[in-house]
Amino acid sequence: MIDKKDAKILQLLQEDGRMPWVELGERVNLSASACQRRVQALLDRGVIEGIAARTNPAALGYEIEAYVSVHVERQDVGRAKKFRNVIQKYPEVQTCHMMSGEVDYLLRVVAPDLKSYGRFVEEKILAMPGVKDASSSIVLDRIKTSSLALP
């Protein structure tokens, strides 16, 4: 668990990851160096996985954002491991989660347009050994995107 100061630091960094140490310290009533040590400790413990710019795919030319449900052959553990290794190499795949229930993997995929998205699914995902099926849900509008700390 984290204390109230660390929770406040997380909240502030998630709102503005470029906040200077001095300002961060002022907002949580700590010195800049104390804030820096706390952030480093949160990184070391894996609470913070990294600090990065959050981007808008459409502004970068990726008009299509989709979630792809992938079903793989469950009897072949080797193929499932290969799927996980290969999927990490595709820059179109922004996230990949192994799921419980009916879907084996859920991918978030971006592409410049519908045609290139269709090619990616057909030539990369469905052509992968062990993949039985994949179905897509295209994002029509982003309502909420957040990486804020848990409530």
Image (cartoon, rainbow, N blue to C red):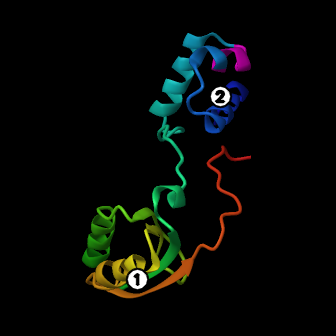
Dominant secondary structure (helix, strand or loop) of the stretch shown in magenta: helix
Q: Which residue lies at the image location 70% right of the left edge and 30% below the top edge?
A: 8
Instruction: Classify residue 114 as left or right of residue 89.
Output: right
Task: Look at the image and give the residue range highlighted in magenta.
Answer: 24-29
Q: Which mark is residue 106?
A: none
Check disc 1 and report its element: helix, strand or loop: helix
Would you place residue 147 above or below residue 97 in this image? Answer: above
- Foreground disc of the pair 1, 2: 1
Instruction: Classify residue 97 as left or right of residue 23.
Output: left
Q: Is residue 76 visible?
A: no
- How many other residues sit within 10 Å of disc 1, few (<14), some (14-19) or many (≥20)? few
Query: In the rendered image, which residue does mark 1 sit on?
Result: 118
Would you place residue 126 above or below residue 113 in this image? Answer: below
Q: Position of residue 95 (x, y in %)?
A: 46, 62
Would you place residue 101 above or below residue 49 in this image? Answer: below
Q: Which residue lies at the image location 52% right of the left edge and 73% below the top edge?
A: 66
Query: In the rendered image, which residue does mark 2 sit on?
Result: 9
Instruction: Classify residue 127 as left or right of residue 148.
Output: left
Q: Amino acid at mark 1?
A: Gly
Q: Quadrant of the N terminus?
A: top right
Q: Amino acid at mark 2?
A: Ile
Quarter where residue 72 is shown: bottom left
N-term-proximal mark, 1 vs 2: 2
Q: Position of residue 78 (x, y in %)?
A: 25, 75
Q: Position of residue 145 (x, y in %)?
A: 65, 56
Q: Which residue lies at the image location 66% right of the left edge and 37% below the top edge?
A: 15
Mark 1–mark 2 Cα distance, whole angstroms, equals 42 Å
Check disc 2 and report its element: helix, strand or loop: helix
